[in-house]
Amino acid sequence: MILDEVTKRTLAKMEIALERACERLPRSFSNHEVRKTIAIKILERAKDGEASLEALTDAALTASATFSGTLPGGIDVTGAAHAKPLESK
């Protein structure tokens, strides 16, 4: 189980990273397979010992960029862990 490999705190950070990345994707990419692929990249980064929110979010945003070519608005994924979530309209 995932909790055997990472702490609950790291799991919470992973969830935040996944949500940050998915919020930036066009709605057409909002599906289970895309989320699963991004989540796998986040988990890989965590298993490599990089469990900071910044590292996990960078992994998530990098993975999400593979679906859209570039992130909406030309968002640079480097250091994006500190980005604020986009507001819903």
Image (cartoon, rainbow, N blue to C red):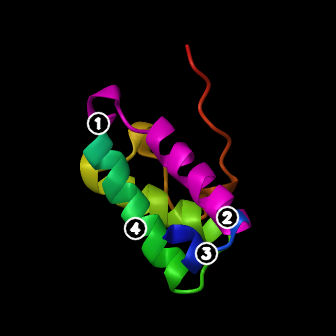
Residue, disc 4: 41
Give the image location of residue 15, x and y in percent. Answer: 58, 52
Upstream in sequence: badge 1 or badge 4 = 1
Residue, disc 3: 6
Query: What is the spatial separation of the Cα atoms under label 3 and label 1, in whole angstroms?
Result: 28 Å
- Name the residue rendered at 68%, 41% in the picture: 84
Counting every numbered tag in the picture gives 4
Whether the residues at callouts 1 and 4 have beta carbons within 8 Å, the answer is no
Query: What is the spatial separation of the Cα atoms under label 1 and label 2, in whole angstroms?
Result: 23 Å
Query: What is the spatial separation of the Cα atoms under label 2 and label 3, in whole angstroms?
Result: 13 Å
Residue toward you, 49 or 74: 49
Q: Could you tell me what secondary structure mostly forms the magenta stretch?
A: helix
Query: What is the spatial separation of the Cα atoms under label 1 and label 4, in whole angstroms?
Result: 16 Å
Q: Amino acid at mark 4?
A: Lys
CA neighbours of label 4 inside 10 A, class few (<14), some (14 to 19), many (20+): many
Q: Mark 2 against mark 3, which lies toward the viewer?
A: 3
Q: Amino acid at mark 3?
A: Val
Residue, disc 2: 53
- Name the residue rendered at 55%, 76% in the picture: 46
Upstream in sequence: badge 3 or badge 4 = 3
Whether the residues at callouts 1 and 2 have beta carbons within 8 Å, the answer is no
Upstream in sequence: badge 1 or badge 2 = 1
Q: Is residue 83 above or below residue 3?
A: above
Asked if residue 78 can be seen in this view, the reply is no
Give the image location of residue 21, x and y in percent. Answer: 48, 48
Q: Mark 3 against mark 4, which lies toward the viewer?
A: 3
Residue toward you, 86 or 49: 49
Upstream in sequence: badge 3 or badge 1 = 3
Tag 3's secondary structure? loop
